[in-house]
Image (spheres, grey):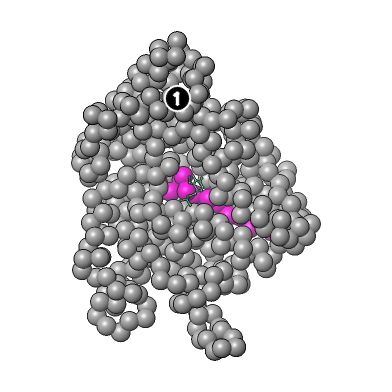
Amino acid sequence: MSAARTSPPARLDVKRIREDFPILERTVHGRPLVYLDNAATSQKPRAVIEAEARYYAEENANIHRGVHWLSEKATASYEAAREKVRAFLNAASVHEIVFVRGATEAVNLVASSFGKNHVRSGDEILVTGLEHHSNLVPWQMLCAETGARLVAAPIDDSGDVPLEEIVSRISERTKLVAVAHVSNALGTVLPVREIVDTAHARGVPVLIDGAQAVPHRAVDVRALGCDFYVFSGHKVYGPTGVGILYGREALLDAMPPWQGGGDMIASVTLEKSTWNVLPYKFEAGTPNIAGGIGLGAALDYVSAIGLDRIEAHEAALLEIGTGLLRSVAGVRLVGTAPEKAGVLSFLLDGVHAHDVGTILDQEGIAIRTGHHCAQPVMDRFGIPATARASLGVYNTAEELEALAQGIRRVAEVFA
Ligand code: PMP
């Protein structure tokens, strides 16, 4: 990751990058769009939109089964996208790259398939208190089914989960550690490398929910040493409806299939079926072919800019945004961990978060309000909701100034 960098990365030409995103040219309620909801989903560059359109216009066919020219073309494009994901994550083999619908489906796949083989009554799954519901509910369901217990390492007042809180909860009963790389509600970056090292020292595999990490920093699954890593295409400037489960080959190989159907089989008789090789064993049915190709284009796009430069740009914006929001009377930031990515969750004194969001929307400023699918985080801080501005590669300091000005006006309305 960026720690290995020897010199600071060159600055981004944000003006030029913004031109790649057609939606940023539009107005909302008659005002220029200020899009600060990137943790929910990011906008799409023309390269991604065109890759999907090109597939439908020029190559559309079902994959893997066809002998005709178009089917071979479509298969080659889809498999080329898989190779792009492999390279992006630095996985050892394309056998380890499973196309799924998104991070949520990837966690469900592991909970169901890995869970079936490895988790019994009395076992434990270890998560943290800052997980997105997608990295919580599937484990709760597995625990309900098996009689295992979900253990959560608590968040401190800054929104951090100290490493010792995680390490001290790994026991001989722990069958899996499942943690976010970056919290969507707080921006906290967890020390995933250290978590993996400690868990592995005790023989416990680790799943990392990288939905909020992959768009913002370079991820190398082999350097991390993790067993599973999941993310969604739509948060990394790619299409919705496609995402990735990375799993170490030996683990995926030993896991039973999840869904049954076409493509995941080697042979079928009326009595019995045998399974296809990896990664197809986990890819039942016709996949989101255009989405996979679009995801490949998105990874090309961010790689061409450079994840190190994106990370540095967003870190600079986070610092500016933090200062600006702190300067607004009545604003309290929720989530001030020392290691943070580009998420600004905040409360405004005496004003419900939804009102903050609704009034900002009238000015063309798109932020998120609510529990951000992380209700336990809200419970931990004793609040129902926050307003959240989340950053992406195309955001600017001027947009953060507009946000701060907008919040001041909201405060005036409610004064
Ligand atoms: N994990 C985290 C940390 C997230 O932020 C999200 C999406 N907000 C998810 C998982 C789920 O992603 P998706 O809805 O794309 O499956």
Q: Residue at x 60, y 35 (%)?
A: 377
Residue 53 drawn above or below residue 284: above
Instruction: Please tell me how crowded label 1 is: few (under 14), some (14-19), or many (20+) other residues with Cα within 10 Å.
Output: some
Q: Residue at x 33, y 26 (%)?
A: 362
Q: Main secondary structure of the magenta part?
A: loop
- Residue type for callout 1: Asp
Query: From the viewer's perspective, is 305 left or right of 269?
Result: left
Query: From the viewer's perspective, is 97 left or right of 172?
Result: left
Answer with the quarter of the image where residue 14 lies: top left
Q: Which residues are magenta?
A: 202-215
Q: Residue at x 43, y 21 (%)?
A: 325
- Residue 280 rendering spot, x and y as whole percentages: 47, 73
Along the viewing direction, whichever of 407 and 125 lies nearer the viewer: 407
Answer with the quarter of the image where residue 113 lies: bottom right
Q: Quadrant of the C terminus?
A: top left
Find numbered disc 1 in the image and state the secondary structure of the residue it sits on. helix
Q: Which residue is mark 1?
A: 355
- Residue 92 rendering spot, x and y as whole percentages: 46, 65
